[in-house]
Image: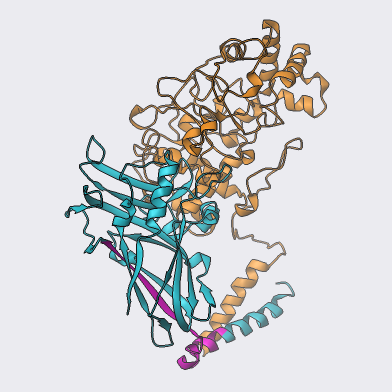
Chain colours: A orange, B cyan
Amino acid sequence: MPWLTAAILLLCLWSCGGDNKEPDPTPIKTGPTPVTWKKPAHFPDPVYNLSRNPLTEEGIELGRHLFYDGILSRTNNVGCGTCHQPQAAFTHHGHDLSHGVDDKLGVRNSPSTQNLAWNTSFFWDGGVHDLDMLPFVPIENPVEMDIKVSDVLEKLRKTPNTNSKVPIDYPKMFQEAFGTNEINAERMMKALSQFMLTMVSANSKYDYFKSGDANALNTQEKEGLLLFQKNCSSCHQGELFTDYSFRNNGLMPMRNDDQGRFGVTSLVIDKYKFKVPSLRNVGYTAPYMHDGRYYTLEEVLDHYTDSVQQMETLDPVFIRPNSKPGITLTNAEKQSIIAFLKTLSDDQFISNPKLADPGIGNAN
Amino acid sequence: MNTLFPKYKLLLFTLLSILVLNACSDPAEVENVATGKFKIEFDNYVGTKNLVLNSVTYQNAQNEDFTVSKFDYYISNIKLTRADGSSYTVPQDSSYFLIREDIKASQIALLNNVPIGDYKTIEFMVGVDSLRNTAPIEKLKGVLDQTGGMDGMYWQWNSGYIHMKLEGTSPVGNPVNNKFYYHIGLYGGYNERTVNNTRIVKLPLGDLTASVTGQKSPEVHLIVDLLKVFNGPGTNLSIKQQEQSQKVANNYAHMFTVDHIH
């Protein structure tokens, strides 16, 4: 059986080639290039299990293309990046609610996709608990991207499409990221997760202050930090500036009577509760609240001092003895808090070219 | 080339030899592996009539007319028990089936590698258990893959499988278009407790025996009576009505009976 011997020898050569640790004079690329995901020193351990989805350069790059490509929508013109734009810290700049395919309007404000590695749940109502399962929601939502993920996979398999503005060869990119050109949901979601996991914001003035540069914050900002710690940090706690809990912060329900977390759990105690959002880059992410009703941080703080509604599920932190609910702050204190909040703005993060649209997006 | 090469070569050669020898060995040897196939057929009925989608009008116990356009449900965690009480649990990764009335082939759960024996009880779960509901995406393949033709049996905005879908029309259905939808999901919740609508069904075969031998693969024929789902007030149900959804789950736990074995 000479053919068998030859086959075995060939197999041996192939196998041993892969195990060869010595640098080869002419390196042949055998797989994706691993990327080490670095946790900022002052951040807690991530929630996402990176060992299940080790980051690679090719995986992240594929994820970046998928993130910005309108091919993920029925109409080919709404990508993730349409409502999660870098310059607005991956929110939809200036939009209280976002418009998806055919300009259909959603019901909630587009949340930032920053620092998702630490999220214990996703969306304002926390209905999703795994980052890899997140993209199914906006892609299949009739008012966002309105297409079955299975149909997206089919479109991706048929690329490069010469009719596209920028034809991308996805089978090739999947091959580079995952070893074969098979395109399936697991790979697509893991690539998107890889890219989103690189959206780590930890280089704000506050972070420099935190890591020892006492001059990174000015007097008013430092004063604001103290006031923030006293008045806001029971919910917006830790280095991510959220405890990821769901709370009712006394917003008067709008006409659509969005009951938030209740829609997921059906528990009466969850009525009108929404996730406490992170405040990182809050200076860039206007408008605010789950429905984007406030356009400035001034309006937000005015809400907390003057407009908190007495409701059955209102969070106890807003209860003031002998007074209507809210938080007590002077105008000067509000200005200091806002000055502090703006030190959470991370310019390096929002202008990082590695996180930017590779030239295929349709942000508007 | 590094010095490990000869060792690897030897090892590989040995491994390959074993593989090749194995492949060429007497087929009789293969049959020594004491397993066989086992089939469970889920035959959907409405009372005493075989279910026909769309065109036939049925009546429930409340004398409400209805037609059925969709009847899908997950069967999982299958366990077979012998007369002596010992049992065989189908390995987790091969234990999920989506029974769809519109796809004939889906109505037979084929179990491979079932140890030889005389089985007296079939046990399974209706729905997808909490562990698999919260498993990472690489564990959600086949009928659990949202992009794999599973017919939308998943709530994406509130992560979780829909254990059972029953849809159709009825004069007492939705006042707008007379349609009714029973979508029953919920597995107990990930970070906050919800109801758990998975149900374990245990079916003793009674006088019958499902024998797996080297030559024989039993096929247990179950009648699944969807009238049982309506064994209570017929209303439209959504995830927001957890209490009612539990009642339906209690109903569908009782829709299975063993009819015959062939």
Q: Nearer the viewer, residue A225 or B109?
A: B109
Residue A239 in the figure: left or right of residue B147: right
| Position of B20 relative to A35 (above/below) | below
For residue A119, which quarter of the picture?
top right
Residue drawn at (49%, 79%) of the image: B82
For residue A242, which quarter of the picture?
top right
The answer to whether residue B153 is visible is no
What span is colored magenta in the figure? B19-45
| Residue A8 within the magenta-colored segment of the rendering | no
| Position of A241 relative to B256 (above/below) | above
- Percent position (x, y) of residue B162? 41, 50
Q: Nearer the viewer, residue A319 or B147?
A: A319
The image quadrant where one finds the C terminus of chain A is: top left
- Percent position (x, y) of residue A80? 47, 36
Residue B188 in the figure: left or right of residue B150: right
Residue drawn at (69%, 76%) of the image: B5
Residue drawn at (53%, 22%) of the image: A289
The answer to whether residue A268 is visible is yes
Residue A67 in the figure: left or right of residue A34: left
Residue drawn at (59%, 37%) of the image: A354
| Position of A273 relative to A310 (above/below) | below
| Position of A261 relative to A174 (above/below) | above
| Residue B28 within the magenta-colored segment of the rendering | yes
Q: Residue furthest top?
A: A331
- Percent position (x, y) of residue B37? 42, 79
- Percent position (x, y) of residue B65? 20, 48
Q: Nearer the viewer, residue B83 or A230?
A: B83
For the image, the number of numbered tags is 0
